[in-house]
Amino acid sequence: MSASPTVEEFWAEVRTALPGLPEAVPEAWAFGATPDHADGLLALVLEGTKTATASSLWDLEHTGDPVPGVGELSIILDGRGVPRALLETTAVEVVAFDEVSESHAFAEGEGDRSLAQWREVHEHYWRAYSASPRGFESRMPIVCERLKLRYAEGRAASTARP
């Protein structure tokens, strides 16, 4: 059994498959708050179902993390911290929690993909896992990010599912 690739090894593999990418290794992170959650959301990305994500602006401000920008690349880790995909941010919009659109909820690809289900799951998530002491409020600012799968598990996006 071979060892899992490091983020740097994964980035070298991606750059070989997708010439022209910058030398600097993008930020590597996992979706969700638990290893199982990370794996479940990653599976949706790899299937082509999850093409968006949402973050609490309050959490980003509290941790000092920047708001994602269009064109930003991210290496996505599985629940064990193994790099598995490269995503590119294609759009960013900051809206109040209670103004997140149905189309954004659908693009996140979770559950029945409805806005009602998105609100229920995300309210629970931010009540349980928010990094900010402000926690959850219905008018809290949410960073809605659209994503494009550029590379997945040994294949460029042209051979990955759309």
Image (cartoon, rainbow, N blue to C red):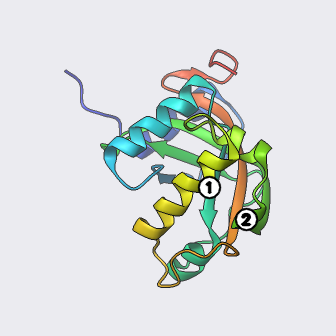
Mark 2 sits on what residue? Answer: 98
Q: Is residue 6 above or below residue 133?
A: above
Residue at coordinates 62% horizontally, 23% vertically from top-left? 156
Residue at coordinates 70% horizontally, 63% vertically from top-left? 143
In the image, 144 versus 25, the foreground residue is 144
In the image, 141 versus 25, the foreground residue is 141
Which element type, helix, strand or loop, lies under badge 2? helix
Q: Position of residue 40 (x, y in %)?
A: 43, 36
Mark 1 sits on what residue? Answer: 119
Q: Is residue 59 left or right of residue 99?
A: left
Q: Is residue 50 above or below residue 61?
A: above
Q: Amino acid at mark 1?
A: Arg
Give whichever of discs 1 and 2 has the lower sequence position.
2
Q: Quadrant of the N terminus?
A: top left
Residues under labels 1 and 2: Cα distance? 8 Å
Q: Residue furthest front?
A: 116
Q: Is residue 43 above or below residue 87?
A: above
Q: Position of residue 87 (x, y in %)?
A: 63, 41
Q: Is residue 12 left or right of residue 115?
A: left
Q: Position of residue 99 (x, y in %)?
A: 78, 62
Q: Amino acid at mark 2?
A: Asp
Which element type, helix, strand or loop, lies under badge 1? helix
Q: Position of residue 83 (x, y in %)?
A: 43, 39
